Amino acid sequence: MNRNLLRFMLGRVVGLVLVLLATSFVVFSAVHLAPGDPVTFLMRGRPITPAAREAITAQYHLDEPFLKQYWMWLTDVLQGDFGRSVQFRQDIGDLVMQKLPLTGFLVGYAMVLILVVGMTLGVVSALRPGFVDKLVLGWTGFSIAIPSYLAGTMLASVFVVKLGWFPGFGGGEGFTDRLWHLTLPAIALALTFAGLLARVTRSAMLDELSREHVEVARSRGVPEGQVIRRHVLRNALGPIVTVIGTMVASLLVATAIVEQTFSIKGIGSMLIGAVTAKDFPVVQALTLLVVAVFLVVNLIVDLLQPLIDPRVTLGGDKR
């Protein structure tokens, strides 16, 4: 088992590294695939003096062969040097570290809401057929259909403008103030994902409820609560955890819209600002960050699957 685990982890890590390398190559190549001169593209089309052109060329090694440029850039990235932002004239690593805690708090807050609301509604819907099930299905259909920006706008218009219960912008200072500031953004961010998780939880629970071993446990007089916990919910956690893993990376992307709606200066707003200002080094860094988070989370989910369901092997198949 330890040998299989080591082989599996090694294979997944190698795959993770290869995907990151491929992504980094595509991201780096984009500046050369853009129309026109790379220096003009990096300077966002602004007039540039010969001295500035020479400085940009030296900074990004544009006078070197393409593959050598990529290797030098990748070496710097592996050392934590993503270059300097064209827009802010600051080191990109420092900019990311300044904004990452705020976005991390928002994503974590939204993830808690998604887990609590989504799993609770999914379980209740599966165990209460009839009116309750239809009510939950109606809500999940509504929540999945609402985009995050629309949910954020609606929440802000009601709870900020009309009722004045929450602040309408900013991320707050300190844990309590930040929790207050980010409540509406977290709800707007979590709404669609909570509906999706509720649907997946309901489907997985219904699938397990129809299993023969559940009927056998009930016929033997095992208490219903114990049947649900040990034989239904536990076996249903496999697909639920898989969906949760994909949601983490998706939340990082979705934060861009919500942060713009509530004027939160996090990673999402930074990405939109970089795209608008054509600050390509920042876009490169944030793209790699999102891909890395997605791959790492999926690796963790794969490693958790055999612990959640012993029937699942490290290769992903059920015995």
Image (tube, helix red, strand yellow):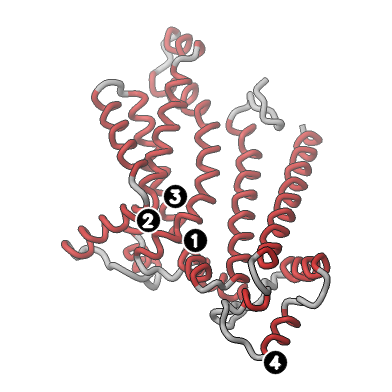
Which residue is identified by label 1? 104
For the view shown, which residue lies furthest in the left direction? Answer: 162
Q: Amino acid at mark 3?
A: Met
Q: Amino acid at mark 4?
A: Ala
Q: Give the foreground label among 1 and 4.
A: 4
Which residue is identified by label 4? 51
Circle nearer the N terminus (4, 2): 4
Marks 1 and 4 sit apart, C-alpha to C-alpha, by 40 Å
Quarter placement of the N terminus: top right
Residue drawn where x is 69% and y is 28% of the image: 313
In the image, residue 302 above or below residue 45: above
Instruction: Sort mark 1 into few (<14), some (14-19) or many (20+) by Cα contacts within 10 Å.
Output: some
Q: Amino acid at mark 2?
A: Ala
Circle nearer the N terminus (2, 3): 3
Residue drawn where x is 25% and y is 64% of the image: 166
In the image, residue 24 above or below residue 204: below
Q: Give the foreground label among 3 and 4.
A: 4
For the view shown, which residue lies furthest in the front direction? Answer: 36
Which residue is identified by label 3? 111
Q: Quadrant of residue 287?
A: bottom right
Circle nearer the N terminus (3, 4): 4
Instruction: Sort mark 3 into few (<14), some (14-19) or many (20+) by Cα contacts within 10 Å.
Output: many
Residue 252 in the image: state x and y as whole percent.
Answer: 50, 56
Mark linked to residue 186: 2
Q: Quadrant of residue 106?
A: bottom left
Marks 2 and 3 sit apart, C-alpha to C-alpha, by 8 Å
Q: What is the number of callouts on the image?
A: 4
Residue 274 in the image: state x and y as whole percent.
Answer: 52, 70
Q: Nearer the viewer, residue 213 or 144?
A: 144
Residue 32 in the image: state x and y as whole percent.
Answer: 70, 67
Q: Nearer the viewer, residue 135 or 88?
A: 88
Circle nearer the N terminus (1, 4): 4
